[in-house]
């Protein structure tokens, strides 16, 4: 009995010592705060990246919905100019392919202009968002090729409103955008022979106007199939475009019924090198 009792007590003592050692090892290891902190930082970083993406991409994602809603305004053979159904659209008839020299101005009948004589070199219009105002005479030539030009008053349109407009233009064929100092409304849309002035960048009529008139194939603009690509330095360089002149055109400005200047660049046919 004595031996049994001693053996039992010995076993119990060994177990206690082993347990104490185990607790000592755990105590020495401690809580892995470095690992936990690293995981938290990674999670926070990922959350930040996702939030940033969602915020930045919101205009593009929302624009897809706006485009889908405006699809009913796409032109058809039975409805060649659906812009006539958009409230506020102003239309006028203009003669195309009347060119002036880069040193000349036109006394346009509208501001911003949306038709009439223009520079022989067109403004690059394949989804270009110009940070500064561009010469009217080059922008009007872009309209002749089937482009929609979004102009805005830089004193009235800022921040999120600029983002909404940019989402409609950047990288999209036959679209261009620029500030227009002194504009009488916050926003003005132009296509050849058509204009729509608006107060807010979330107005659905913007998307309806674009759907109805951009490269409308039904004779709405003069030069179907004409290029919108940049011509480059010496002609029209989108990195250094001719500056907008806010002053009133002088007595030497060309009238709206002008027939064209000798030596002005001739209109290019699709695929033809510049100047021919």
Image (cartoon, rainbow, N blue to C red):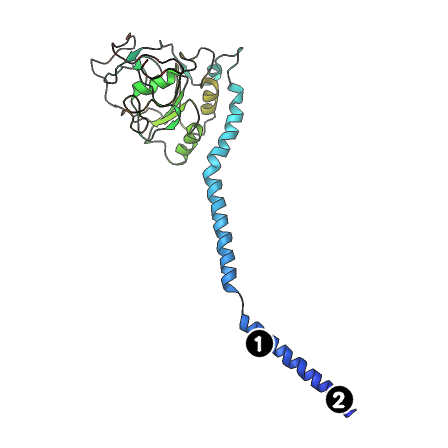
Q: Earlier in the sequence, mark 2 or mark 1?
A: 2
* Quadrant of res 181: top left
Q: Is residue 112 above or below residue 40?
A: above
Foreground of the two, 260 or 2: 2
Quadrant holding the N terminus: bottom right
Foreground of the two, 158 or 253: 253
Residue 272's spot in the image, x, y percent? 37, 15
* Quadrant of res 111: top left
- The residue that appears at 31% across and 12% down in the rendered structure is 266
- Look at the numbered disc 1 and give the secondary structure of its residue: helix
* Quadrant of res 176: top left
- The residue that appears at 51% across and 23% down in the rendered structure is 70
- Look at the numbered disc 2 and give the secondary structure of its residue: helix
Residue underneath mark 2: 5
Residue 175's spot in the image, x, y percent? 41, 24
189 lies left or right of 38: left
- The residue that appears at 50% across and 26% down in the rendered structure is 67
Foreground of the two, 73 or 26: 26
Residue 92's spot in the image, x, y percent? 38, 11
- Bin the neighbour count of mark 1 within 10 Å (Cα to Cα): few under 14, some 14-19, many 20 and up: few
- Bin the neighbour count of mark 2 within 10 Å (Cα to Cα): few under 14, some 14-19, many 20 and up: few
Q: Is residue 35 above or below residue 79?
A: below
Residue lying furthest bottom: 2
Quadrant holding the C terminus: top left
Residue underneath mark 1: 24
Residue lying furthest left: 251
- The residue that appears at 34% across and 10% down in the rendered structure is 97
Residue 241's spot in the image, x, y percent? 29, 26
């Amino acid at each position: 009995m004595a031996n049994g009792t001693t053996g039992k007590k010995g076993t119990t003592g060994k177990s206690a010592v082993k347990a104490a050692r185990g607790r000592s090892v755990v105590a020495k290891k401690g809580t892995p705060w470095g690992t936990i902190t690293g995981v938290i930082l990674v999670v926070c970083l990922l959350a930040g990246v996702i939030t940033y993406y969602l915020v930045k991409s919101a205009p593009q994602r929302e624009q897809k919905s706006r485009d889908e809603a405006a699809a009913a305004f796409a032109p058809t053979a039975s409805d060649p100019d659906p812009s006539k159904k958009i409230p506020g659209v102003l239309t006028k008839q203009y003669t195309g392919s009347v060119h002036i020299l880069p040193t000349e101005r036109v006394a346009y009948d509208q501001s911003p202009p949306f038709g009439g004589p223009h520079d022989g070199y067109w403004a690059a219009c394949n989804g270009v968002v110009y940070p500064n105002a561009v010469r009217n005479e080059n922008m009007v030539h872009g309209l002749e090729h089937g482009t929609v030009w979004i102009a805005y008053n830089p004193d009235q349109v800022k921040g999120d409103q600029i983002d909404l407009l940019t989402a409609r233009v950047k990288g999209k064929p036959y679209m261009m955008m620029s500030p227009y100092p002194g504009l009488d409304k916050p926003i003005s849309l132009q296509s050849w022979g058509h204009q729509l002035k608006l107060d807010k960048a979330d107005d659905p009529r913007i998307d309806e106007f674009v759907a109805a008139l951009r490269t409308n194939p039904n004779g709405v603009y003069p030069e179907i199939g004409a290029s919108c690509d940049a011509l480059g330095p010496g002609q029209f360089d989108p990195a250094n475009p001719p500056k907008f002149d806010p002053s009133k055109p002088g007595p030497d400005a060309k009238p709206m019924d002008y027939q064209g200047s000798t030596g002005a660049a001739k209109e290019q046919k699709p695929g033809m090198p510049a100047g021919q």
